[in-house]
Amino acid sequence: MQAMKCRKQVSGDQARSASVPWRASVLGCALAGASASVSAQIAFQAQLAIATGPAPIAIAVADFNGDGKLDLAVAMKGNDRVYLYSGNGDGTFSFAVSYPVGSQPMAIVAADFNHDGKLDLATANAVSGNVSILLGNGNGTFQTAVAYAAGDTPVSIAADTFNPDGYVDLVVANGGNVCAPPLAPCGTVSLLRNNGDGTFHTGTTLYPQFLPSRVTTGSFHGSDSDIVVTSYGSNAFLTYLGDGGGAFPTVRGPFATSGAYAVVVADFNGDGKSDLALPRFNLGDVSLQLGNGDGTFLAAGIFSEGAVGGGAGSAAIGDFDGDGFPDLAVANVNDGSIAVLRDRTVGNGGFWGALTFTGGLSQPIAIAVGDFNRDGKPDFIVVNNAGDNLTVFLNTSIPVDRIFANGFE
């Protein structure tokens, strides 16, 4: 499936709203394609870019004001702030407020850190070497950020519950080289333990013996939460297996994978075990690592070679075609494209050929999934680092169960 460029078609009402800097308007741009193997129509409609601050780099999607509509929190590397956008429930957003955080925030995550039923935010700040915690008020506003020390050059952050206290902790990947030869290069992974009131104390520091690029969590050997760390420079990833009590006594790996930044967790082959999908930054394909259920993985299957795009730096999952299985969306910062891959879920899993989009994107560096217009279908939003804006793609796909053999309803 070849990429399709957008052609701008702005109505009179949209032209008038274009002067409002914080509101998205629809562009007449659709991305559509039918799989050669099954009758499924995939289509997305791009919206007019939403202006941000300088150098947006990461995004969190959640209902921050409790109105039932998804909102956005966007980390700005260029001015060390987090911008909040209120969702209007129709796929458009309005700028609300911004807050200062640490120096050069590189990642952001939303969770309820103080058990008050309101969502909070945490950013990983590369230059200041810390994490900023913004406790939410439940109405879309947040308290002043509080900083907690992490390691050298925090570049990625994830939130999860690692022990029986039920509090959401933080795990941070630090990309700074803290080891001298012969151990170098060597970064760290910091665990920040939640005190239960939204404050944190320093926990264990993990030493993966490579420079971490991304960190995420999942359950790979039972019900306990585990940690996955990738390293672009070392062409590898590993897992730290949690014991349910807050410790990580077992390390699996490192496992070889060439040049992967991004990593997402899902059951891609329907066997009830968590797998990993790692889009490979330099190779334009996806390394699918099927889990064995014990924290190890089968030999990687490589899918969509040459079709994903150049410089895959972020990925997200969503059931875009409505077949009940997780699909993959990849943001490619080098060639300014987005690739959507539908899950095959047959045999050992894998993906159908990528559907790509290149119009109106400028160094797409992050991507997130959510139902932004409340039609029951997952959409996605792209952070354009060089464009200082966001692009929403509304899902206009025809669900698989509504398609007849001729491809029409």
Image (tube, rainbow, N blue to C red):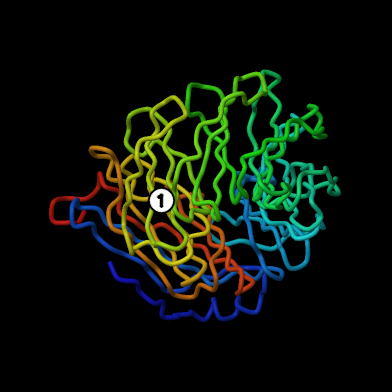
Q: Position of residue 263 (x, y in %)?
A: 50, 47
Residue placed under numbered mark 1 in the picture: 328
Q: Give amino acid for label 1.
A: Leu
- Identified at 44% across, 56% down, the residue is 280
Locate residue 16 relative to residue 334 in the image: left or right. right
Q: Residue at coordinates 41% horizontally, 26% vertically from top-left? A: 293
Image position of 20 with respect to 76: above or below: below
Q: Is residue 305 visible?
A: yes
Q: Residue furthest left?
A: 406
User: Could you tell me if residue 123 is visible in this image?
Assistant: no
Check disc 1 and report its element: helix, strand or loop.
Answer: strand
Q: Is residue 233 above or below residue 49?
A: above
Residue 64, position as x, y percentages in the image: 68, 46
Quarter occupied by residue 87? bottom right
In this view, the residue in front, 201 or 402, is: 201
Q: Is residue 368 left or right of residue 120?
A: left
Seen from the viewer's position, the closer of residues 170 and 74 is: 170
Quick check: 150 above or below 81? above
Q: Please tell me whether residue 77 is drawn above or below residue 145 in the rendered image.
A: below
Q: Quadrant of the N terminus?
A: bottom left
From the viewer's perspective, tell me whether residue 348 is left or right of residue 291: left
Residue 398 in percent (x, y) is at 30, 54
Which quarter of the figure is the C terminus placed in? bottom left
